[in-house]
Image (spheres, rainbow, N blue to C red):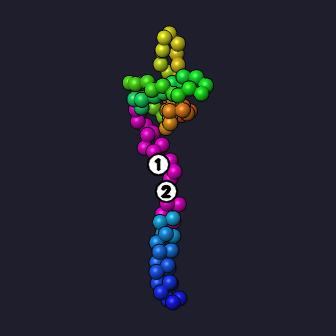
């Protein structure tokens, strides 16, 4: 009985351990690395506290740090542009696109 359990459980455990180890060495910021040095054409503006972010397109911004923040003029007011993953949290700063 012990050998039957050992023969089925041990390979499954070893397989799970191998998957966990491979995931432990991958970067959590893979998407951020890919976006550096690329032109961002969709950005968001903050609509207000508790309000969803509003999509602005087309724009020409970048994620990589630069001297000038990326802004857009809406109804005569310069509004700062952000990158976001969700519609409710705009917090990723965008900068003016610079050719490298």
Residue 25 against residue 89 in the figure, above or below: below
Label 2: state its secondary structure: loop
Q: Quadrant of the C terminus?
A: top left
Label 1: state its secondary structure: helix
| Relative image position of residue 40 (x, y in whole percent) | 42, 32
| Relative image position of residue 8 (x, y in whole percent) | 46, 80
- Judging depth in this view, the residue of 46 and 52 nearest the camera is 52
Residue 58 against residue 88 in the figure, above or below: above
Q: In which quarter of the view is residue 56 placed?
A: top left
- Badge 1 local density, few (<14 within 10 Å), some, or many (20+)? few
Pointer 2 residue: 26
Pointer 1 residue: 30
Residue drawn 48% across the image and 14% down it: 74
Q: Which residues are magenta?
A: 21-39
Residue 23: tell me if it is visible: yes
Residue drawn 53% across the image and 60% down it: 24
């Amino acid at each position: 009985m012990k050998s039957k359990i050992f023969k089925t459980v041990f390979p499954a455990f070893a397989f799970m351990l191998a998957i966990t180890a491979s995931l432990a060495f991958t970067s959590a910021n893979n998407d951020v690395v890919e976006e550096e040095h690329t032109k961002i054409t969709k950005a968001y503006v903050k609509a207000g506290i508790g309000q969803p972010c509003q999509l602005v397109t087309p724009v020409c911004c970048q994620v990589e740090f630069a001297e000038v923040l990326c802004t857009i003029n809406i109804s005569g007011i310069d509004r700062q542009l952000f990158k976001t993953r969700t519609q409710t949290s705009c917090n990723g700063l965008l900068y003016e696109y610079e050719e490298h």
